[in-house]
Every structure is written in C-alpha cells, then in structure tokens.
Amino acid sequence: RVVELPGKGRGVVAARFFARGERIEQAPVIIIEEPHVAAVETSILDNYVYNWDRERIAVALGCGSLYNHSYQPNAVYLKNFASGVIDYVALCDIQPGQEILINYNGDPSCQTRVWFDVIEPT
C-alpha cells in the first residue's frame, strides 16, 4: 500500500506478510530514450526514475517508483531487461504494515551516498 510516512512523504508498506525470497511486485517500466533523458533529469520526475542501462532511464509503474531508500533495505530490485520489468524481492521476512525499502544504489549492501539525506527507520 502507498501511504504517507511522517517526515518522509509517500512510501510503500506491506499489505500482507512477505517471506524472504518472495517477489513483492513485478513492475512494468516505461523506458525513456535519449534525447528525452535530459528533459527528465531537469524535472521532478528525476527523483522517481531508475537508470535502465548506459543511455536510458525507466519509470517503474505500480509502486515501483515509490519505494523509499535505505542502507539497510528489506527488499531488492532486479531489472529484467528482456521483459521490461523490475522485480522487487524480499531480502528478509516483511510483516504487514512494515515499510518496504530498497537500496537505490542497486546493491543492497552498497553504502555509496545518495543525492538526499536518508531517513532510516527507527
């Protein structure tokens, strides 16, 4: 479910239990080709896109572009280039009402700084 989270804005919380390794969502993507990438990068939409490959970016439909970032994520995203989707998979058991968090760097263990101040769950 998409909800308002105090101090964070919108985010996604589990509507049901997800077991470790279970797919949470498969989000189709809209691929944005060059030369349109530069236009998106100067808009608010830039905060909601994924780097798809070296030249293109993608908007994930469903809840895909609304998952918040964490350096201790409970989910991972996996790009499926052939199918044009992103799969979101639980890294651990996720309880109903718990926020679903991904690492925007792609690798769940990557600690590279992102472009905003991160609010970690308490």
Image (cartoon, rainbow, N blue to C red):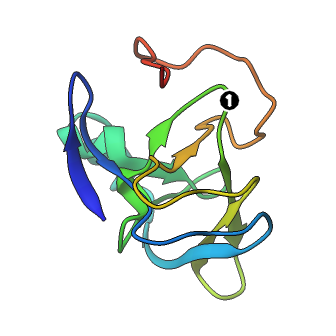
State the image coordinates of residue 82 (x, y, percent, origin top left): 72, 85
Q: Which quadrant holds the N terminus?
A: bottom left
Tag 1, which secondary structure? loop
Label 1 crowd (10 A; few <14 / some 14-19 / many >=20) = some
Left or right side of 68 for 52: right
Left or right side of 95 for 23: right
- As displayed, is residue 106 above or below residue 13? above
Residue 43 vs residue 17, the one in the foreground: 17
State the image coordinates of residue 49 (x, y, percent, origin top left): 41, 50
Residue at image mark 1:
72
Q: Which residue is at 47% across, 72% downward?
A: 16
State the image coordinates of residue 110 (x, y, percent, origin top left): 78, 27
Residue 41 vs residue 83, the one in the foreground: 83
Q: Which residue is at 81% across, 31% downward?
A: 109
Location of residue 81 (image quadrant): bottom right
Location of residue 20 (image quadrant): bottom right
Residue 53 vs residue 73, the one in the foreground: 73
Residue 29 vs residue 73, the one in the foreground: 73
Q: Amino acid at mark 1?
A: Gln
State the image coordinates of residue 80 (x, y, percent, origin top left): 71, 76
- As displayed, is residue 117 above or below residue 107? above
- As displayed, is residue 46 above or below residue 95? above
- As displayed, is residue 103 above or below residue 61? above
The extreme bottom residue here reads 83
Location of residue 39 (image quadrant): top left
